[in-house]
Amino acid sequence: MRVLVLGGGGREHTICYVLSKSPKLEKLFCIPGNGGISEIAETTENISVTDFENIARFCKEKRIDLVIPGPEEPLVKGLRDNLEKEGIKVFGPDSFSSLIEGSKSFAKEIMNKAGIPTARFEVFDEPSKAKAYIEKKGAPIVVKADGLCAGKGVFVCETKEEAIKAVEKIMEEKIFGEAGNKIIIEEKLVGEEASYIVITDGFNFKTLPTSQDHKRLLDNDEGPNTGGMGAYSPTPLIDQELKKRIEEKIVAPTLKALEREGHPYLGFLYAGLMIVDKEPYVLEFNCRLGDPEAQVILPRIENDFLEIIEAVLEGNLNKVDLKEKEGAAVCVVMASKGYPGKYEKGKKIEGLDKALQIPGVIVFHAGTKKINNEFYTSGGRVLGITALDKDIPSAIEKAYKAVSMIHFEGVHYRKDIGKRAFKYLSGF
Ligand code: AMP
Ligand code: GLY
């Protein structure tokens, strides 16, 4: 198979990495890719991931059999709808089903119709009504922009004043543009967060290894929110019993609801969950794999990744026996100074070869560029150092050993990735 991956982060390097291990792969392409991806795929930087006309042309020229998008934006904007018209297969939902991430009010409507547990909410398209609602409800309260905001559209507010300011920023100052035409105001849930990701053909689904992200920039979950500073898998927070509840109460009814709408969902479905007193609630859905969750999930799958994707496209997913590897994986993100704000670029990365000599260590590149056989930083999140080992403590130790060997000027990483698991292991 000739496969094109879209995107250039750590998640996309991971997708390329597992694809490159498949005997079914003939040739791998990636738009735009990054330094690490360029070592295993033919990369092309001058086409945007939402330029469907040029992507279709590229696919025909390179005789691509299948396109796998990493990020949500091309899916929400209609990647699958556009490429299928040209006879090109896409592993991901159509634009209608991608609204499960692209519009928080759409996602809430689907959840309401299907009786899926989520925070109580109201939708507003007028700031005055939203503010009056906040005055009535009080704080804490959560304000969310409806559309895609690159992970920045959620304000968890501890006071009424903060919540009213969030409404003003989103609806009046329009800091997210059109994505803030509507807002959701919902109750704050207090519990433990987890990422629950399944692969589905719309009718059957297989649960991928469970994982937990670390969203805040600093140790002990302090500092601003980021795209994710590290992850580990599996998470002891989700035992077999909870898994069953999540699948029965959330995954299966969501897929059924989208099927009923006439748009069976195909691809990765990511439920961002809050576990409150052992009961799962949906905070959000994503129409893609998580980043850095992918970096710990995909390397823990025993099966040939391309074989699973093929089964989904052929509607044969029920015949796949998805096997999770024993042990655990931990990924520590190494980021540029200044991330998630303005960050520095062009710093030389050293020590990669030495770190890669540790058995069970994989270095996934995100914001890197390869110039004359050397790697330089070119993004906020630069590397995801993943370690596989027999259990979480050993994987943590190994990941940090590799991290200590790698250096670039201004590097920042969290020192406590994976430690949260100990809380659940001791019964919290
Ligand atoms: P979302 O993009 O909707 O997942 O929100 C981003 C982050 O905001 C989540 O990972 C949570 O940490 C937090 N969050 C979102 N909704 C709620 C809620 N209803 N209660 C508490 N925290 C929330
Ligand atoms: N790591 C969170 C996300 O990918 O949405």
Image (cartoon, grey):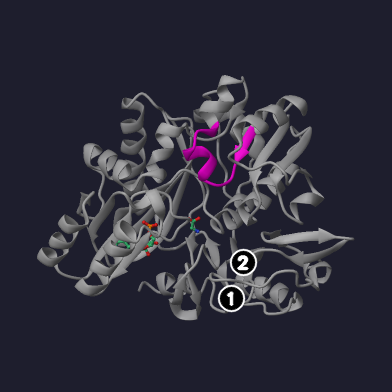
Quarter placement of the N terminus: top right
| Residue 400 figure quarter | bottom right
Residue 386 in view: no
In magenta stretch: residue 283: no
Whether label 1 lies within 8 Å of ligand 2 gets the answer: no
Q: Which residue is mark 1?
A: 338
In the picture provided, is 397 more to the left or to the right than 36?
Answer: left
CA gap, disc 1 and disc 2? 8 Å
Pick the front one: 167 or 138:
167
In the picture provided, is 293 more to the left or to the right than 173?
Answer: right
Q: Residue at x 48, y 30 (%)?
A: 201
Return the x and y of residue 223 as percentages of the image width and height: 45, 78
Q: Which residue is mark 2?
A: 380
The image quadrant in which ligand 1 is located: bottom left
Callout 2 environment at 10 Å: few (<14), some (14 to 19), or many (20+)?
A: many
Kind of residue at badge 2: Gly
Q: Residue at x 58, y 28 (%)?
A: 311
| Span colored in magenta | 67-79
Pick the front one: 16 or 170:
170
Kind of residue at badge 1: Gly
Residue 49 in view: yes
Q: Secondary structure at mark 2?
A: loop
